[in-house]
Image (cartoon, coloured by chain):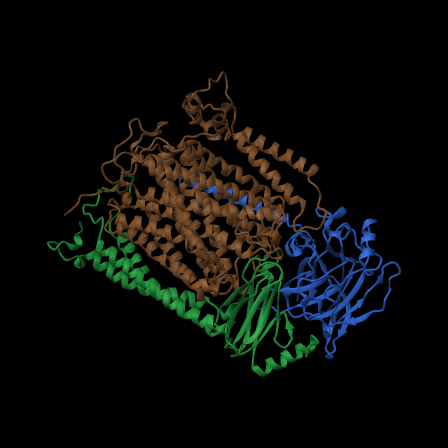
Chain colours: A brown, B green, C blue
Amino acid sequence: MTTLMSKPVSAPGKSIIERLNIVTALVLGAVSAFVVWRLALQFLPGDTEVRLFTREDKITLLSMIAWFVGFMTGIGALVGPFRWLMGKDLSHDENMFLAGKDMGINRYFRYTTDHKVVGIQYLIITMVIFGIGGILAMLIRTNLGTPEGGWIHPQAYNSIVGTHGIIMIVGTIIMVTGPFGNFIMPIMIGARDMAFPRLNALSFWLIVAAAVPLIWAQFIGGISTGWSAYNPLAGQAPLGMNGYIMFICIFAISTMVAGANITTTIVRMRAKGMTWNRTPIFIYGIMASVALALPAFPVFFLSQVMSGMDRALDTSFYNTAGGGSGWLYENLFWIMGHPEVYVILIPAVAALMEMAPVFTRRPLFSFNVAVMGIAGISGLSVLVWAHHMYISGWAPLLNAPFMLTTELISIPTGMLFLVLVGTLWRGRLWMTMPTLSIFALLWNFMIGGVTGIYLSDVPADAFLHGSMYVTAHFHYTLMGAGLTGALAALVYWFPKMTGRMFDKKLSWISFWLVQIGFNVTFLGMFTVGLAGQPRRVESYASTFNTGNMITTIGAYVIMVGMLVLLHGVISSWRSGEKAPMNPWQAKTLEWTVANPIPLENFDVLPTVTSDAYGYGKAQS
Amino acid sequence: MTDLMNSKKPQWWKSPDVKKTAILWAVCTALVGYVGTEFHVRSIVEPASETMSGVIDLMRIFTWAAAPVAGLVFAMCLTVLTSKRHYGDNPPAEADHQISNSPRANAVWIVVSALLCLFALITGLIVLQKDSEAVLESTAIQMNVTGSQWVWSFDYPNGARSEDLYLPVDKPVVFHITSVDVKHSFWIVQMGIKMDANPGAITEAAVTPNKIGVFDVRCAELCGLLHAYMQTKVHVVSQSDYDKWVTEHAALEGRA
Amino acid sequence: MNKRILAALGTVILGAGVIAGIGTYVAAAKNDSGSIMATSAGSFTAPDGKTYPHYTLTMNTYPNSTFGGHHGEDGGAHPDWVSYGAAGPYGEPLTDAKTGTNFVVPAHSAVTITIWQYDSGETLNNDFFAKVRGTVGGTATLVERYDTKSHTNATEAKTITQIPHDAVGHTFTIHGVSSDQDSLFINVPLLLANDDEVTAAEEEGGFTQFPSMTTFTFITGGEGEYIWNCEFPCGDGTVARFGNAMSAMSYMSGHFTVKG
């Protein structure tokens, strides 16, 4: 066994690994999709009777699966497992090649295993996702600038709303754990890489593979169902729905793989002496996030597999006429959907909790309460999903218990507030964009949290559910709190990730534009929700005109702010001021490695003797 | 461990920043409570039923209950922001005191938030109980509601049918809601009730309109192409007008 | 203003331009069919004695889109989808009409619509739509078989208030958002055409000689933006048969604008 597995392969000339990159992946993916499409068109029997779904659904799904397999093969995901099956393993040189040793820019376009490369890849794809999602948001707000709507075709509008929703959800899920969880986390815990470097590369390239079916979907009818893709409405949607199904399935695998990898790394690979008491709070945030995703995303995966089976194999999981139930879909969807919002939120808040001591020059207030808060939210969040279904009629008797669990979440959430204000209290405030972001988070998350209490209340929800009020509420939590934390994290860790400082002036300008625009946008949206405007409408009664106009103007301000930020990223990355090793004088381990960071981070693995928050002298 | 309990030091509540925060706390609480309730009450629709008035009262109560917590957080933020700030590329000196924990503050915070949570829960449960019982009201008008893409239709007990809803004032009504195609959500905006219309199932919601006038029904669940247009009006009229209207309309359906 | 801020401003302008470009592209892709204005036809005296300016509209419903018209030559992207389309004065298909399913009518007027229904039919999802609703007198005039060759009624015209809910070809149903505009709700079921004749004509690439013809009149209120759609489930291959043609504008739905 051992001899078989450790026998290195001598690679004369260029081995297969060295030939594979994003180009081979795209080509192989496209070719497989085309070949399978042609074959299916040729050999798949036609519909002999009128079926709920047509042959084209089967053909589309098969072609998309072929794309997926082709792309992953082309990028090199199968080389390792295949070698292993043959009883061989990768040679040392090949492993170093995979880690991206001495490869320059090329390593970002390959199946590279170095966690720092994966972190940068995640950063770029997150920015691309936010860019696309932001453009779609602008289209939505422009269409809603006037009551009549109709600037965009209503079904295209529905599809834009759905696509904006799902890709922003995906973008926010990966925005902290992707770039910073991969790049910063291993250094922060004093490790040389992740526990499973090849799984790390796999989780990233799966997201790229997933993106294509979603883009593809836009050209075959779109996903006209909103991001939740409720059945039976999804059963009316055009062929584009298959793209949504494939996208979710592949993305769910990516999240599961990343979750297993990150959890293992944190549990097993912390530096000597980094006991749980000395582990930085950001690590807890990352771990809670991915650990929550572990039970949530298999359910999401399953819900979409069943949706795909309904479309392609004539099953009736969700189709009422065939004995299925739309409520089944709603349950599966929200069993993923509610933990998922905390998958997004926790690491963003934890990132700001990590920065708060640095920018107030004092210790984190009540570390234990912070951990309890994160653990409490994680635990409760798997028990609240049916508050999305208070008025679905599914189980009115369960409304009271789900109201209980939902409102209980306010207790651990309150703990996070306590930790943040406690840390700020009597701190020496060092005014930077991350510092401002802490205050912005407290403001936005307070509004998001308090409006969440109204929504958790069944009688109030009977009025508010499905209205613009809900839309404003979750933007306050996911964007006002989540994205604010992620943008602060970008500015904070930018010097370590790129070796250059983020342009200070631009970070401030974009901060104020985004925050002011954000509050204008979504306070306006609250008012139209209260006045009775439903969600996801492409036109509305003229009484909602003023509120929508305010919201649209606010949205344009956000757009300007985000473009300034984008400019800041590009210009600082290219020609920003060179960053010192530890520009913020922070005490976590990632600031102890040199810029640029050596391939294996640490020559000698560090030993930790205290927590990372020892600012100031104790006075007692 | 903490300076809060150190008796050799001056009492903590006498320090100037605590006093400042206390004043700000009072101001912020009042502001959050007042602005928060006004924001909601002014934006929200005029209620046309007890249920809706109850929703507005709940918002008022919850806003005022949350105001001290939000007020404290904002007050502390303001105190911090208005004390000495440091600009520049290098960090300021480290804060020379250390309160890295305060079990008393933690305990107070957690107990208070638990009590607030309990309060919200009990308030909600009382109203929920009332709403649930309304569905069982035996004297109520039993109305069938059908969602079809993208029109609501209503079936009255005497056989009348319509696409806009007529209801008598001050009379309880129970809606039996279903759909013939996809999920819709039946929302009488000014009456504060909403219930999904599911294909293959019947769900129930109840309300007693208490105001004569014209109100809105909107679909609150994305139901396809013309979801935005799946709306109609509710006419709440006197009992005699209602009787006249349903009799006429039952005759139109040939069911008088 | 230093150089970095100016550069950032450049990025903002560039980015806004890109977004505007994408918006224009998406908006242009909506492929709107343009609007048909109602034709003036003298005045109309309602049963209650009031007189209104009178306008007329004509339209056809087809079992497929091969008539061209606003879908373009050979039926455009989905020639097999059922569709409404512009009609000539005797129900003849207007194959080169660029307008199809958006209508504009004047406010406070009587509007008479005539629809030739060339499609076969079946059962409604909701029998509510089998009844004529919202028209003058709650009635419509139905010619079960209209001869499009000789421009005469092959069967006698009769006044109807409803048709059997399992004999519906399509419906014409107007509604709008609940707002400060006047309510306008019209529903008229259109009788199916003979199934065998429809199929036979389709195989020859044409339409049946004997569509049903339905005429009805309603009074418009003030200005408003409304929508109309068909309530007969004709989107085969989807849940509740409301996908495909039913879920795309300018096939079985369109805008209905009342102008002052």
Location of residue A610 (image quadrant): top left
Direction bottom: furthest residue: B240
Please state the horizontal and vertical placement of residue B45, each as a whole percent of the image.
Answer: 48, 69
Please state the horizontal and vertical placement of residue B59, each as a whole percent of the image.
Answer: 40, 66
User: Left of B92 or right of it: where is B199?
Assistant: right
- Report if residue A363 is visible in the image: yes
Please state the horizontal and vertical placement of residue C198, each as a whole percent of the image.
Answer: 81, 55
Decide which of C165, A106 is in the foreground and name it: C165
Residue at image point 53% right, 40% down: A211
Q: Quadrant of the N terminus of chain A?
A: top left
Instruction: Note whether A234 is above or below A278 in the view shown.
Output: below
Direction top: furthest residue: A12
Direction right: furthest residue: C150
Please state the horizontal and vertical placement of residue A326, each as a whole percent of the image.
Answer: 55, 56
User: Left of A322 or right of it: where is B24?
Assistant: left
Location of residue A580 (image quadrant): top left
Decide which of C7, C64 is in the foreground and name it: C64
Instruction: Note whether A275 is above or below B237 in the view shown.
Output: above
Decide which of C195, A577 is in the foreground and name it: C195
Decide which of C34, C4 is in the foreground and name it: C34
- Report if residue A152 is visible in the image: no
Q: How many labels does the image show?
A: 0
Residue at image point 15% right, 47% down: A619
User: Left of C78 or right of it: where is B204?
Assistant: left
